[in-house]
Amino acid sequence: MSRLAIRIPFIVLAAGAALLLGLQAHAEDTRVIFPKDLELFVHYMTVKRGNVTEHISTTPEAIEAVKKGQPIPNGTQFVLTDYRDGELYRYFVMEKGPGWGADYDERRRTGDWQYQWFWPNKQINLKENTARCMSCHSSQKRNDYLFTAQRLSEFRGTPLE
């Protein structure tokens, strides 16, 4: 077999692999960090879908701001703790920072919120596509980009379902 006959399949395989790698979802750069004081967050809502249970938490200050109709303060984090079949699977953290929206093209911004997925060991989950999070949350502009803003205002100490 000639060298050319060997090279052509290798080149085709390499090009295919590069194409597939280019299409894989990946985390974008964000400023979001895992909360240092997650145990102080308030679990205000639980969402159940099949074998998935999500606990949604935030700070008492964010809850008060929403209840008073005030803007959510910069530095606020919301955490979705994702359980699968009762086991911790991952965390989703959205965090608001002053001017953070400017990190992204204007068409993709969700105010000054940024997003990041984390593994149970609190390391960044690079397999998740955070651009997808921005796209979905953009539909909630009137609620400061939160899906649970109305439910948050109804919270009275026991997690809502």
Image (cartoon, rainbow, N blue to C red):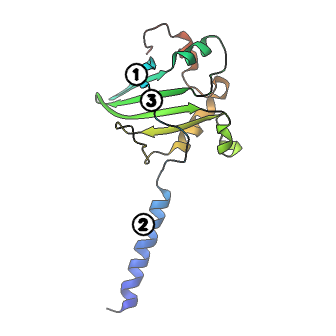
Closer to the chain start, of discs 2 and 1, is 2
Image: 93 above or below 19:
above
- x and y percent of residue 160 in the render? 45, 13
| Disc 3/disc 2 C-alpha distance (Å) | 39 Å
Task: Say whether marks 2 and 1 touch (CB < 8 Å).
Answer: no
Say which amino acid is labelled 3.
Lys
| Mark-to-mark CA distance, 2 and 1 | 43 Å
Q: Are marks 3 and 2 in contact (CB under 8 Å)?
A: no
**Picture quarter with the C terminus:** top left
Picture coordinates of residue 103, whole percent (x, y): 65, 44
Q: Residue at x 28, y 30 (%)?
A: 85
Farthest residue in the right direction? 106
Instruction: Name the residue beneath numbered marker 3.
Output: 36
x then y, percent, for residue 119 = 37, 39
- Quadrant for the N terminus, please: bottom left
Q: Can you tell which mark lies on residue 161?
A: none
Question: SS at mark 1?
Answer: helix
Name the residue furthest bottom.
2
Q: Nearer the viewer, mark 3 or mark 2?
A: 3
Q: Nearer the viewer, residue 121 or 68?
A: 121
- Given residues 157 and 25, the one toward you in this image is 157
Residue hosting label 1: 39
Mark 3: few, some, or many residues within 10 Å (few <14, many ≥20)? few
Give the x, y percent position of residue 146: 58, 26
**Residue at point 49%, 39% (across, down):** 116
Which residue appears farthest toward the front when viewing the image? Answer: 36
Label 2 sits on what residue type? Answer: Ala
Q: Mark 3 or mark 2: name the one nearer the start of the chain.
A: 2
Q: Amino acid at mark 1?
A: Glu
Label 1 to label 3, Cα distance in Å? 9 Å
